């Protein structure tokens, strides 16, 4: 049985990854280290609680003593690092938290892993050959795009927010441990994720929540900012492939090939809601589209992101199972079920 340290998996992407990974790999024990900030919720992992191959530890990735204890106590033989502060608006208001978690936290994990697994630079201890550090990053490190190009693994970094700058910094630290110490690392940069269990603060859950409550649905600027949307389980499958089969010292971009403007996103969601929970019955309006409101654009708002996932598709055989039209229906239905459950519990 091999123990893998997962960080931050009480959050959105990680909480979709853990049950998938547990089921697929019966030879793994998964150790989840999570501080449970506002973005982490153990309810997201309720289905895993009774599994003897899953263990939750509450703690901070910046706490070196704790990380060292976990490596020793559980004989950690791999790391998949999800933990990060990730909300751009919050990074504008309070950038220091992002530097602490995303930069210092990543450094702590890398440094402990390197010392635990390796005798000296470029020499792994006998029992730890093949141990890998997989760092989960974002397409936002590349900055903004023109109307036609795509981000590739060769795109120069040009982060424009404190969040993306902190993630770019952590990517560089991972690279330095590969180049300086010969540590076995891989990095994945993903496009915007969506799906079940996403925190309420993000765009898609906000649209659904505001619509059902009959509140204004805020859209930044002119609503024409473009993102490439990736269904969360497709992202999890990409992480799995790269962790197990990706070439050491490589970066792999994971994108859904689903470019949408924010206006197209809100239109798609309100159309689905109009069909499933008619607005006339829910909020006494003809359509949820009447709630769409344009608000002042946020600082440093990148105009367009879009990922070229060719390397992952051709070298490792990855393919997204969901396109946006299918994935968004699954997502809306999940949030409607969650809302219905909350309503029943509050009675």
Image (spheres, helix red, strand yellow):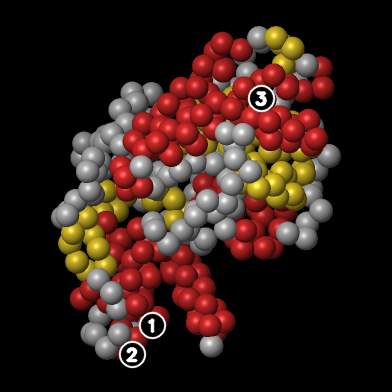
- What is the CA distance from the residue labelled 1 to the residue labelled 3? 51 Å
Q: Earlier in the sequence, mark 1 or mark 3?
A: 3
The residue to which callout 3 is attached is 112
- Secondary-structure class at tag 3: helix
Residue 9 lies, in percent from the top left, at 60, 48
Q: Nearer the viewer, residue 73 or 334?
A: 73
Residue 140 lies, in percent from the top left, at 36, 37
State the image quarter where residue 119 is shown.
Answer: top right
Crowd rating for badge 3 (residues with CA inside 10 Å; few <14, some 14–19, many 20+):
some
Could you tell whether 233 is left or right of 153 in the image? Answer: right
Residue 266 lies, in percent from the top left, at 29, 64
- What is the CA distance from the residue labelled 1 to the residue labelled 2? 8 Å
Above or below, 63 against 55 in this view is: above
The reply to whether dot 1 and dot 2 touch (C-beta < 8 Å) is yes
Residue at image x 61%, y 63%?
Answer: 43
Per the rendering, the mark at residue 281 is 2
State the image quarter where residue 148 is shown.
Answer: top left
Could you tell whether 303 is left or right of 257 in the image? Answer: left
- What is the CA distance from the residue labelled 3 to the residue labelled 2? 56 Å
Crowd rating for badge 2 (residues with CA inside 10 Å; few <14, some 14–19, many 20+):
few
The residue to which callout 1 is attached is 277
């Amino acid at each position: 049985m091999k123990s893998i340290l997962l960080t931050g998996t009480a959050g959105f992407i990680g909480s979709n990854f853990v049950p998938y990974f547990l089921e697929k790999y019966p030879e793994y024990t998964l150790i989840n280290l999570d501080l449970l900030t506002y973005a982490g919720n153990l309810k997201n992992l309720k289905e895993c609680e009774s599994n003897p191959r899953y263990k939750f530890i509450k703690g901070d990735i910046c706490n070196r003593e704790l990380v060292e204890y976990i490596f020793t106590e559980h004989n950690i033989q791999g790391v998949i690092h999800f933990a990060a502060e990730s909300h751009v608006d919050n990074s504008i208001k309070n950038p220091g938290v992002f530097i602490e978690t995303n930069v210092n936290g990543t450094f702590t994990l890398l440094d402990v892993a390197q010392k635990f697994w390796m005798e000296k630079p470029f020499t792994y201890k006998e029992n730890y050959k093949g141990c890998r550090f997989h760092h989960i990053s974002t397409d936002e490190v590349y900055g903004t795009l023109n109307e036609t190009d795509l981000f590739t693994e060769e795109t120069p970094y040009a982060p424009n927010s404190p969040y993306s700058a902190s993630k770019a910094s952590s990517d560089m630290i991972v690279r330095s441990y590969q180049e300086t110490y010969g540590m076995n690392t891989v990095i994945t940069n993903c496009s915007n994720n969506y799906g079940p269990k996403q925190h309420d603060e993000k765009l898609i859950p906000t649209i659904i929540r505001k619509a059902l409550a009959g509140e204004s649905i805020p859209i930044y600027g002119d609503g024409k900012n473009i993102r490439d949307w990736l269904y969360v389980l497709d992202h999890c499958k990409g992480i799995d492939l790269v962790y197990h089969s990706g070439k050491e010292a490589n970066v792999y971009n994971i994108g859904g090939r689903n470019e949408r403007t924010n206006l197209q996103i809100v239109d798609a969601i309100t159309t689905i809601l109009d069909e499933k929970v008619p607005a006339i019955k829910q909020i006494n309006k003809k359509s949820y589209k009447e709630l769409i409101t344009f608000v002042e654009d946020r600082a440093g708002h990148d105009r367009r992101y879009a990922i070229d996932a060719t390397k992952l598709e051709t070298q490792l055989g990855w393919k997204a199972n969901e396109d946006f039209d299918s994935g968004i229906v699954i997502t809306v239905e999940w949030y409607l079920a969650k809302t219905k459950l909350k309503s029943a519990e509050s009675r």
